[in-house]
Amino acid sequence: MDTPGPGLAAGFGKIRVLLVEDEAVDATLAEANLRRSALDVELRCVGSEDELRRGIREFDPHLVVSDFTLRGFDGYAALAVTREMAPALPFIFLSDNARVEGSLGQGATDFVRKTDLSRLVPTIERALREKAVIDAKHLMESELGESRRRLSDILDATREWIWEIDSAGHFTFSNRFAQDSLGYSPEEILGRDHLELVHPDDRGAVAQRWAGIAAGYAPDSGLVARWLGRDGGIRWLDCRAVTVRDAGCAIRGFRGAARDVTLGQQHEEKIARLTRVNELLSRFNTAIGRIDNGPSLLRESCRLAVEYGGYQFAVVFMIVPGTSSVSASAWWGIDDVSVRARQYQFGGDPPPAGSVLIAQAMQSGSAVASTEGEAAFHPAILPQESAARGIRSVAALPLSVDGTSVGLLTLHAREANAFDAEVLVSLQKIAAEMSFALQYLRHEDMLQRMSYFDALTGLANRALWCERLARRIQSAESTNSQIALVAFDLDGLSVINDGCGRDVGDRLLQRVAENLRGAAGSSERIAYLGSGVFSAFFEGTAQLADLTETCRTRVESLLEEPLVVEGREVRVSARIGAARYPDDGRDPQTLLQNAEIALRRAKYGGDRFVRYSPRLSTDAAARLALEAQLRQSVKEESFELHYQPIVDAATGRITAVESLLRWRHPAEGLVSAGQIIPILESLGLIEQVGAWVLRRAATDRRAWLERGLPAMRVAVNVSAAQLRRADFVETVLGALDGTRPAQVWLDLEVTESMLMHDIDASMHKLGQLRSHGVRIAIDDFGTGYSSLNRLARLPITTLKIDRSFVHGVEVDRRSVAIVQTILSLSRSLGLRTIAEGIETDRQRALLASMGCDELQGYLFSQPLPAAECADLVLKCSRPNRRASAGRPKVPACKAGGRRKSRSPSLSP
């Protein structure tokens, strides 16, 4: 039997034994056996699972001795509870149950039979010794792990990168500092070739340093080299290393440390860059004093930037006149073939790929820099040349003259982030000096150019154009060739200027100039004469008619496709006037003047193309005289308003009158609006005349009321130019002079085409007037284009059926169908209808039977002066006057008189 020695027993101290036993006799025997031993035992006995759990938790035993057969739960359950609460606690079964022999495989430490209690104490001692050995081992492992963790924490806490590589150059160890410096975790670095993380330009130096260390002759100082970070950036590391050798002194690799010196290195580089820039500024100031022309100054600036600024190459781009593009004008450090005639467009939103940096600089007027990886850098300016030279940073420095950008200096560097804020400030000083020098050197040239070229389009102006024509005419005389000259004007330019802004109109002119220049092959054959008028000529030996037609066709073909201006698609057409040498003039002034006379005839006559003839000069003189007379009439407000009655279709009573503009010509007498309104529009006077019409209509109506006439509504036609004005609503309300909405007498007549131009703005203005009681009528309805959706949205009250449909109702079924459709549509929308141009009783009867509300035409009265119209209204409104059955109360006018015609804006 094993018996414990005194020393062994004493070494355990007081041993706490938790006895799991529900039989009192067995518990007493076990306790007696333990008391007889040399062990100092403190015993606690439990008999259930709850007591076992409480005993482990509160008694904190050194081991558990358990019976196998228990009431309520068995020994395996007791073993499971013990392993759950104290996995390392020794567990000994004390039982005669045959199943205890298999308990060792279930996690029990040992077992003792109750019939052999003498083995209990030795078994306990052995279990405690094994537990002590295990605890000691765990303690050593814990202390070793703590030491390793402490060392790892120290290595990770140090501000250096601790690393180790094997003989093949692959990482075998790295501390956490690599993640702070390079962005790689130790796990990502292990196993990688260390040279993969070294900048390609420094790999040779690093490999050479390791070879020197291995041979024993490397210098003691560290090696500062560039390493590649995970984000593609560069970090400067100062590395020191020692060899790692095996027992046989063979080199197993290298172990070392590296300090991140990026900030210091960057600081040194910044100082070096600023020093170079200051040197460049000094050299440039010297160059300004000795260079007397712009091209030489630009080229010398590029040379100094490369040779003293340290940049790989430099290019100056200057604006191509009349465009939103720049082209290379001077360069250094790059082949002429690579950069000559290279252009970049900086307009548009967003700007074209490859022009982002240029666009930013030109649009902001400030220096802009970009480095590799940024959106503005890829694709870089001159991408192929930049890639070949390893360019990683680009700066664009705008050049300006008189506050206007004229170009930019671009600098290209191999260093990443070569243009920080401080460097850009210094470089901007150079750009400012260049701009000042250019402004000084180009002052005389610019004055000369301004006298010969149009500033907006860059094309020849009238003076230079005549000089060029003179040379061409001289050449044509000697070669017996002919010249076709055209002057053409862009339709709707004033509408674009008013609706989209003057800037858009200017850009449109520039785009047209670009297209003309491209089609002509040079700017020698084209000119811009101002006010939207261009000129071009063609020469040859063909028949003049053929040559002129060729000239016309080329101009029209240039305008077939829409132009994209400021992101908007704009369609334009042209009115063209042509003159021919020698038939229409033998000197440039006469030839150009006659082409412009033909152009004016095209504009006023509504033609697209007009060839000059001597008769046009006579017409032009008459036209000038007429324009002068109209200007004077507008100034003196010497126009007249005539009024045509509008009658109720059912009762024949006069319900309203329409005001119609007239002008009394000094020689020809009364002239209708159809003849003068196009001229007023071309002179920009239609808005003044329209405002006068409103005021005069209000004055005439007040006079009628004073004479005792019944209150009638007065219709006034509105021009497109009036409706576009911002103060249109205020002008109309001013004519009403505070009249309450319920008493407002004014009807405004507008055409469908006017509303469709800018429907939202028109709706807003007309809606405001409608809220003040003004009624809105669509004149000439059915001749324009109105979608039902738009028509339903318009704040209108009346549709006026055009006279062309009224005249056809007597003989044309289609006209009848159209009129019936308009009347049905009006009723559906709750609108009143007026039929214009009623001239026969049958027309009156048909329109009345169809349900038309009101009628107007020569059947009832021609337009009359205000006083005569008042007499007619008084005559028709007398109580004792009765209409014959079905006939209107207004007497039909006598045959003859001027019939009513229609203009696009004001009705005649």
Image (cartoon, grey):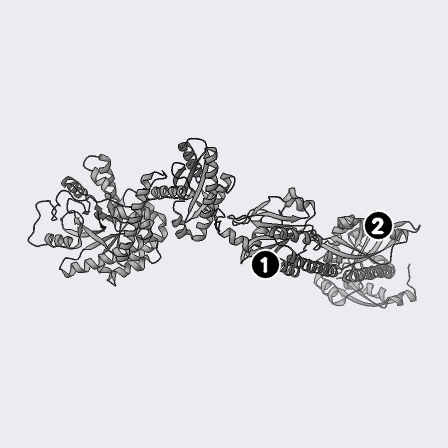
Residue indicated by mark 2: 208
Q: Is residue 646 shown above or below 525?
A: below
Earlier sequence position, callout 1 versus callout 2: 2
Q: Residue at x 16, y 60 (%)?
A: 705
**Residue 441, position as x, y percentages in the image:** 58, 55
Residue found farthest to the left: 880
Circle 2 Cα neighbour tier, 10 Å, few/some/many (<14 / 14–19 / ≥20): few
Specify whether residue 889 is painted magenta: yes
Residue 429 can be seen, yes or no = yes
Marks 1 and 2 sit apart, C-alpha to C-alpha, by 52 Å
**Residue 549, position as x, y percentages in the image:** 41, 34
Left or right relative to 214: residue 57? left
Residue indicated by mark 1: 436
Q: Residue at x 68, y 54 (%)?
A: 304
Q: Nearer the viewer, residue 894 or 530?
A: 530
The kind of residue tagged 1 is Phe
The kind of residue tagged 2 is Gln
Q: Secondary structure at mark 1?
A: helix
**Residue 356, position as x, y percentages in the image:** 58, 50
Q: Residue at x 34, y 47 (%)?
A: 756
Question: Which stretch is magenta?
Answer: 883-907
Assess whether mark 2 and mark 1 are in contact (beta carbons under 8 angstroms).
Answer: no
Q: Is residue 472 shown above or below 26?
A: above
Residue 77 can be seen, yes or no = no
Specify whether residue 369 is painted magenta: no
Specify the principal SS of the magenta part.
loop
Q: Residue at x 22, y 35 (%)?
A: 813
Q: State which quadrant residue 818 falls in.
A: top left
Of discs 1 and 2, which sits in the foreground?
A: 1
Left or right relative to 368: residue 729? left
